[in-house]
Image: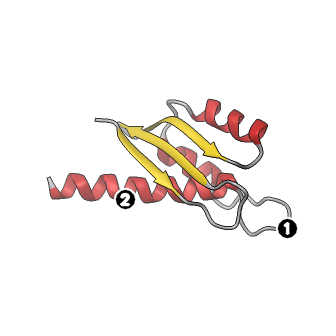
Amino acid sequence: MREHYEFKPEGVCTKLITFDIEEGKIYGLHFLGGCPGNLAAISKLLEGYDAMKASELLIGNRCGHRSTSCADQLAIAIEQAMTTEAERRIAS
């Protein structure tokens, strides 16, 4: 079953990150705001990609002098979503 997630990032230009996860894979990734070319490319590259692998790849990426980036914030969002998914499975 496909689950939808919304994440409000901190410390970056993007105002909202939305995506779905189905069977551990990312679908429909969208960034509201931020660098449109780069974020559209990330969205295309990660369509159908393993969520945990994406998180591992993106965590810790920085944007210039900032301590985070849109990619880093996405990694945090994915980790939170996967934790929620695991909790749902345990509760079922």
The residue located at (69%, 67%) in the rendering is 11
Q: Determine the image quadrant of residue 2.
A: top left
Seen at 56% across and 45% down, the residue is: 54
The residue wearing badge 2 is 83
Is residue 36 shown left or right of residue 27? right
Q: Position of residue 90 (x, y in %)?
A: 19, 57
Count neighbours of disc 1 (C-alpha within 10 A) and say few if under 14, some if 14 to 19, many if 20 or more.
few
Q: Amino acid at mark 2?
A: Thr
Judged from the image, the secondary structure of the residue bearing numbered disc 1 is loop
Quarter where residue 81 is shown: bottom left
Model colouring: secondary structure
Disc 2 + disc 1, Cβ < 8 Å = no
Residue lying furthest left in this view?
92
> In the figure, 77 relative to 67: above or below?
above
* Residue displayed at 73% across by 57% down: 13
As measured in the structure, the alpha-carbon distance from the residue carrying label 2 to the one carrying label 1 is 29 Å
Quadrant of the frame with the N terminus? top left
Residue 61, percent from left and from top: 72, 57
User: Of helix, strand and loop, which one carries label 2?
Assistant: helix
Q: Give percent across and percent down for residue 40.
A: 69, 35
Is 72 in front, or is 57? 72
Return the residue at label 1.
65
